[in-house]
Amino acid sequence: MSEKETETLLYLDGVSVSFDGFKALNELSLVIEAGEMRAIIGPNGAGKTTMMDVVTGKTRPDSGTILFDGNVDLTRLDEAAIAELGIGRKFQKPTVFDRHTVWDNLELALAGRRTTMSALFRAEGPQERQRIEELLGIIRLGEQRHTLAANLSHGQKQWLEIGMLLAQEPKLLLVDEPAAGMTDAETEATAVLLKEIAKEKSVIVVEHDMAFVRALGVKVTVLNEGSVLSEGTIDHVSEDPRVIEVYLGR
Amino acid sequence: MSGFIRNGFDRSAVFVVLVLIAAAVAVPALNLSTPAGSPLHIPDYAVPLIGKYLTYALLALSVGLIWGYCGILSLGHGAFFALGGYAMGMYLMRQIGTRGVYGDPVLPDFMVFLNWKELPVAWYGFQFFPYAMLMVLLVPGILAFVFGWFAFRSRVTGVYLSIITQAMTFALMLGFFRNNLGFGGNNGLTDFKDILGFNIQAPETRAALFAASAVALALAYVICKAIIASRFGKVLVAIRDAESRTRFLGYRVEHHKLVVWTLSACMAGVAGALYVPQVGIINPGEFEPANSIEVVIWVAVGGRGLLVGPMVGAILVNFAKSWFTTGALAPYWLFALGGLFVGVTLFLPKGIVGTLAGGWTALRQRRTSAEAEAGTAPTAPDGPPGGRLNPEAAE
């Protein structure tokens, strides 16, 4: 663990993105260590989702550097290539494949095997089945394995999506508002689940819910108007006068 | 590879294949070996007519595969059908030889008429049946590959994709109407004499073409079924329902679309190649945008959620069309077709087959749950979907 902390997994330097003149990201710089869990908070329009878009290849930055795992330049790659490098993303709204069963959703997400030919001619092997069983245990959906994802509750969909992320075996997980729309009990269970995941992987959590961020107990980065406003423990940032100003208005 | 085919072979697939094989045997047999007065006799005119329906069913299946399972709505599949038809037509033209009106051993009549001295390069090799059959697959396949490569890579989806497929078939139609393109212009290719040495008008040849159409449809159905049962098929459905999510999972959406799109175009080409000898003509009218739209109506009427839907839809609608357009109701056929499309869209969104299948499943579920309450239902073995888990593998 201590060895890991000296490695940088994700490195953003001077990243800017603008849409029709609106600067969504403004010279954003951010460093995530290997094995680190980081919470990112900020008011609406602070650039949280855009930050995820540029890291996962959905949006190309106008300028700046994004390096992953030492020297891989993410700005040159598309979504599929970035996902294969080991960056998984969970969306704000749970997006699972409604017309597939829980099992098939996980099967589709399993690491490796992304070519059309392997998809056509290779059936799932015993190892893959075992891995899916394992994931079903982690996300507590063993009973629902044959249920169509469309028929799951909101919280279960969120977990299924987290399970799909795990199945991808990413090095870095980007999680957008995992607790949105969940009951208190589900929120708590989700925090436990994320902490469990963070033992092995780097995780970036974007969240609105301050109580949830507090429950995670990790380093917090506050974004505002597309750049970093403050960084530190939750107590540190919540006492920062600039943070109080943007959150409470001037 | 054999596992690939076996995975798709469930009970409904066996049923469909058996029906098609039965038709491939029974229709020719009832036509050839029963006397004309017999109640079981299938008249000569009906064999190529039903054969034509089967080629339409194959065309509809190719559209159903991409529309129903990958969300690609093609309004230009008639183009691939027509190209396959032209490849077959060119072979048939070159078989005419000296029996043409002008008796030129090499040049088809229309070229002699246009005062051409040499056979255009595009016609080289079409006197050989295997070469022509290869072109039946390659010409639509390559066009689809190039078209799909650009369209899917640029992430053209939804209605925009539909519009450019429509533009594609329209452009081809205009091209084929021109005499100097060298494919018979306005008149197309016709006056065929024989295929593989057999008289194309003979009842035996027509019976063989009918059987070939039924077998081709069964084969294509089995291939589609296997594709859908594979993980590739699951990726296609994932793309249909949440394209960008699939991309973030690391799948190259454009590659998957390209594979299924090209395959679908090849299927449409085969359908066209079987269509032409049975109707005896291919002309640029087959490229008309309205034809491709009609295919989409067949698929919608039959139901696009299942592979059988498009096949049944194509046969039913075309049967209705033949029935309508030979009677006093002929002028009203297009109104009936339009009304059918609107009616199905409003009242049977899953199509005829989809609605029937849904009703059947609901009925079975109700019966199973009733049995479960009575405590007589057999307990389902717990395993991954498809029941492919065996005890050794689980360890």
Image (tube, rainbow, N blue to C red):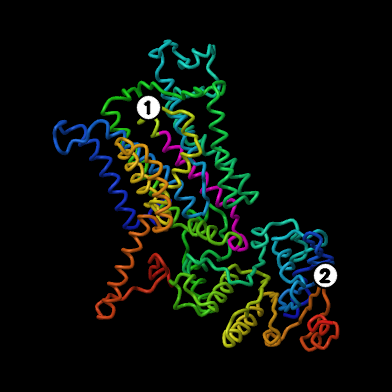
Q: Quadrant of residue B274?
A: top left
Residue B345 or residue A197, whichever sits in front: B345
Magenta-drawn stretch, dominant element (helix, strand or loop): helix
Q: Residue at x 79, y 61 (%)?
A: A18
**B151 sits left or right of B64 in the view:** right
User: What secondary structure is marked by label 2?
Assistant: strand
Image position of B193 with respect to B164: above or below: above
The residue that appears at 33% across and 25% down in the rendered structure is B200
Decide if residue B41 is on the left or right side of residue A164: left
Q: Mark 1, mark 2: which one is toward the viewer?
A: 1
- The kind of residue on which mark 1 rests is Gly
Chain under label 1? Answer: B
Residue B280 — which label? 1
Split into 4 quadrants, where in the image is the N terminus of chain A? bottom right
Q: Position of residue B207 (x, y in %)?
A: 28, 33
Identify residue for label 2: A29
> Does residue B215 lie above or below A76 as drawn?
above
Q: Same chain for the residues at labels 1 and 2, yes or no?
A: no
Per the image, label 1 sits on a secondary structure element best described as loop
Residue A34 versus residue B64 in the image, above or below: below
Of residue B181 and residue B269, the one placed in the foreground of this image is B181
Q: Which mark is residue B23?
A: none
Whole-percent x, y for residue A125 in the image: 47, 64
Question: From mark 1 to mark 2, how far is it between C-alphas?
Answer: 70 Å
Residue B265 lies in the magenta stretch: yes
Q: Quadrant of residue B278?
A: top left
Left or right: residue A73 compared with residue B57: right
Question: Which percent across, then down, holds residue B80?
Answer: 49, 38
B169 falls in the magenta region:
no
Quarter holding residue B372:
bottom left
Q: Is residue B361 left or right of residue B110?
A: left
Region rendered in magenta: B245-273
